[in-house]
Image (tube, helix red, strand yellow):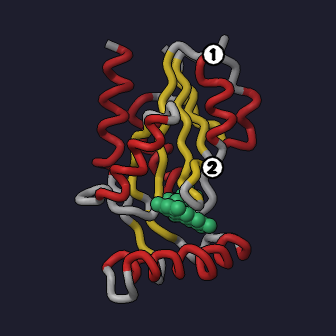
Amino acid sequence: MKIALVYKSSTGFTERYAEYIAEKTGAELVKYSERKRVESSDYDILVFGSSIIAAGISGVAWFDKVKNEFKHSFLFVTGANPKEDNPDLEKYIEAEKIKGHDIFYMPGGLNYEKMSAPMRFVMKKMFLPMVKKEQGEDSIMYKMVSSSYSLYDEKYAQPLLDEIRRVFA
Ligand SMILES: Cc1cc2nc3c(=O)[nH]c(=O)nc-3n(C[C@H](O)[C@H](O)[C@H](O)COP(=O)(O)O)c2cc1C
């Protein structure tokens, strides 16, 4: 079975998970900008990795358009949120499931140094004030998102790797 792993990553978190998943599964890595060369006649499995931007999944409209052409398709997303003990994240994943997105969530983090200037602007002017308003200035989340951090861990890729292996079995 051939796997194409298309990924969209601006600051590197999604890319790091994508590289790890490709290493473990033999998937061919394809940057989102080159997605048009991924034909369903050439691959059995399509994996799409992206990130949550302002509560939406970046590039998911493309994935929705093409996913049914493949025998199997999987979607993983990275975000700023920790995975454990996070009811807000669980609610988000449930809401996406209703929209037809069965997400494998992998915590990324924030990398202000690698962010483009417009993205950094949105973070400082919209995301940070939103977290402050919703969770308070003394909250763990607000303190966390005020500067760069990484929650990357290979263990978060395991559920997706297990599913891909199940398809192969
Ligand atoms: C403008 C902007 C908006 C974001 N909005 C969210 C969000 O709504 N929820 C979330 O969990 N993470 C949010 N993030 C964090 C990213 O999803 C996180 O940094 C992700 O791992 C980035 O992936 P990448 O490094 O592959 O680009 C946002 C990041 C940026 C720059």
What is the quadrant of the C terminus in the image?
A: top left
The residue sitting at 63% across, 81% down in the picture is 125
Instruction: In this rendered view, identify the residue nearer to me: 151 or 97.
Output: 97
Residue 45 location in percent, x, y?
52, 21
- Nearest the camera: 93 or 23? 93
Question: Where is residue 19 shown, x and y percent of the image?
Answer: 49, 44
Q: Amino acid at mark 2?
A: Ser
Residue denoted by label 2 = 58
Q: Residue furthest left?
A: 85
Q: Residue furthest bottom?
A: 138
From the viewer's perspective, tell me whether residue 45 is left or right of residue 107.
Answer: right
Q: Position of residue 23 (x, y in %)?
A: 43, 37
User: What residue is shown with label 1?
Assistant: 69
Q: Which one is earlier in the sequence, the residue at label 1 or at label 2? A: 2
Q: Hey, what amino acid is under mark 1? A: Glu
Q: Please, what secondary structure does the residue beneath circle 1 have?
A: helix
Q: Using the rendered view, name the quadrant where residue 68 is placed.
A: top right
> Does mark 2's beta carbon lie closer than 8 Å to ligand 1?
yes
Residue 12 visible somewhere in the drawing: no
- Seen from the viewer's position, the closer of residues 105 and 28 is 105
